[in-house]
Amino acid sequence: MHRIFIALAGAVLAATAAAASEKTDVMAVVHRWADGFNQGDSKMELATCADETSIIDDIAPHEWHGAGACSRWKDDYDAFLKKNEITDTLATVLQPRHIEISADTAYVVVPVTLAFKHGGKDLKDSGIFTLALKKGPSGWLITGWAWAEH
């Protein structure tokens, strides 16, 4: 009986460690996306996205999907910044509110603060970044995300 308990406890601990590792791997993708965003490194940012992606954001046209969606969003976002004289954007990913992993899919809800200059004036905003990710041969990639300002 003692051996069964030890084996069961070991299996539970191993499963818990594996789940923690997957959550760390998923959040690493979210942080890489933010790092690319903050550094103005489109290549780094876009490398976190699957080719087939779905995006909802508060800038027009508000929705992008399909092949190359992240790249099209980035082009529209950059045009929005230029048109509105927004510079020095800095996204800070906070502690995730929710991470759910089911086999090779993940769902993440994470608050984000966004600091930027608008016409030279320092401003801050905050919102919720909700993401769906899929694990493939090269690791986790973002398959969808939505930004909700609050």
Image: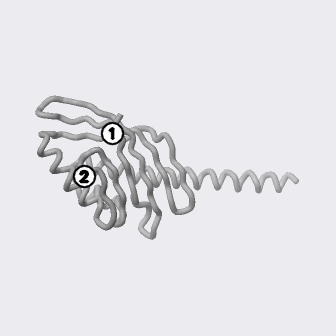
> What residue is drawn where x is 78% and y is 52%?
6
Circle 2 — which element?
loop
Q: Quadrant of residue 70?
A: bottom left
> What residue is drawn where x is 42% and y is 47%?
130
- Dot 2, crowdedness within 10 Å: few (<14), some or many (≥20)? few
Q: Which residue is most to the front?
A: 61
Residue 64 as seen in the image, left or right of residue 122: right
- Dot 1, crowdedness within 10 Å: few (<14), some or many (≥20)? some
Residue 25 spot, x, y in % from top left? 46, 54
Quarter of the N terminus within the rendering: bottom right
* Residue bearing the label numbered 1: 92
Residue 118 spot, x, y in % from top left? 16, 34
Residue 115 as seen in the image, left or right of residue 50: left
> What residue is drawn where x is 34% and y is 60%?
49
* Residue bearing the label numbered 2: 61
> What residue is drawn where x is 25% and y is 46%?
59
Circle 1 — which element?
strand
Q: Quadrant of residue 83?
A: top left
Q: Nearer the viewer, residue 14 or 149?
A: 149
Residue 111 vs 107, above or below: the answer is above
Q: Nearer the viewer, residue 34 or 69?
A: 69
Residue 87 vs 77, above or below: the answer is above
Q: Earlier in the sequence, mark 2 or mark 1?
A: 2
Type of amino acid under label 2: Pro
Disc 2 versus disc 1: nearer the observer = 2
Q: Which residue is most to the bottom?
A: 137
Residue 61 spot, x, y in % from top left? 25, 52
